[in-house]
Amino acid sequence: MKLTEYHYLPEGLLERPASSLYRQLDGPTLIHLPGLRQEPLFISVLQHGNEDTGWEAVRRLLKSHYSFDPLPRSVSLLIGNVEAARFNKRRLDNQPDYNRCWPQEKSGGHESEVHNTFRHVYDIMQAKNPFAAIDIHNNTGLNPHYAAINQLDNRFFRLAALFSNTVVYFTIPEGVLSNAFSNFCPAVTLECGLAGNIHGTDHTLAYLESCLHLPQLDNIPLPGEEMGLFHMVATVKVDANLDIGFGGNGHELSLIENLDHMNFRELETNTLFGYTRDKTTLPFITTDMHGKNVSGKFFSFEDGEIRTTHPIMPSMLTMDQKVIHQDCLCYLMERMDPQHSRAGHDEPLPEPTGLEGIDN
Ligand SMILES: [Zn+2]
């Protein structure tokens, strides 16, 4: 798989929706466009072929800028999985997940041709000394927009908080673009809600526009109210045979209605999660990143009411019983203090923390 590189915008490209890029592009394509400030803003779209918000935002961004005025800053645009986008799929069956194929310190043995291509992109971009890197995704389910980062650094916080007050720190899975680019520039993964939603495109477009006009990213702490920083601390699983229902309280585990509205919302202590018929045991198990049972730290049950005992932010909550049984009920995130978790501080860095199950 060869990388195609352009130093101009191919004629007619902006007229194409993601599903027809394959007619003009032969696989991953890196396009460099000059701007007034030289250090480029790196923008990655369509690493997952069915997540087209990034491409839709870039089409509008470049239509409004490029044809008339010079860009305020150079742009290097990576268009990722053109083949999967043709079929509106995250990836094709014979392809690896593109956002697991970026250079990492510990190489995992066999590397695919996608790894080789992305190593090439990484080398090209590192030499260009980018201003920042932005990798744009969509997710499934009911999630607010949020930004995710892989380093605890004021410049990363600023880049992320410009998109959303909710910022998630993660270090696994490996091979993620934003993690690789963090080696040489501030980098962020954007989760822009459901693909095809115009609000996601509007928000992403406004964000890219702001980033293009930024002269610099200061290494100065953000005021606390401008960012909630979270990291993954636990997974909640239920027994495969557990009888689950929503609303009411007649089931072994009766979850509250519209449970998925709690995704990426910071819940206060004592928030009601559901009811349990058997009033002597919790009907699910909460484990930390090392697999240790920490149920009692996060949940209480009295008179059959399951409540939180700790401020937490859940993700991946779903009303789909099959997913709950096969995968998990949810993941739990905890708030971090950005200024007490920074590299270089005396405080130890947090445990490796993952975004499993979150569609990044
Ligand atoms: Zn994605």
Image (tube, helix red, strand yellow):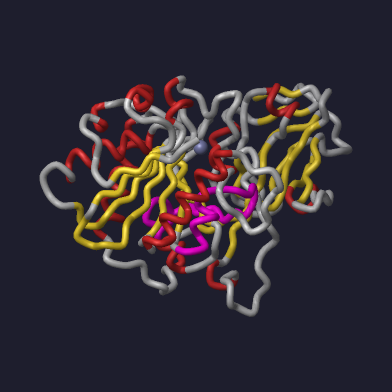
- At horizontal 31% and vertical 38% (from top left) the residue drawn is 57
Q: Nearer the viewer, residue 89 or 25?
A: 25
Determine if residue 327 is in view. Answer: yes
Q: Nearer the viewer, residue 185 or 286?
A: 185
Up-down: is 298 above or below 261?
below
Confirm whether the magenta stretch covers residue 175.
yes
Determine if residue 360 is in view. Answer: no
Q: Nearer the viewer, residue 208 or 11?
A: 11
- At horizontal 58% and vertical 30% (from top left) the residue drawn is 95
- At horizontal 47% and vertical 42% (from top left) the residue drawn is 191
Horizontal side, residue 235 vs residue 344: left or right: right
- Residue lying farthest right? 280
Up-down: is 349 above or below 189?
below
Confirm whether the magenta stretch covers residue 84.
no
- Residue lying farthest front? 2
**Residue 352's spot in the image, x, y percent?**
68, 57
**Residue 38's spot in the image, x, y percent?**
26, 62
Range shown magenta: 159-184
**Residue 19's spot in the image, x, y percent?**
38, 23
Q: Nearer the viewer, residue 209 or 94?
A: 94
Up-down: is 257 above or below 33?
above
Up-down: is 40 above or below 31?
below
**In which quadrant is the C terminus drawn?**
top right
Snapshot quadrant of residue 62: top left
- Residue lying farthest bottom? 346
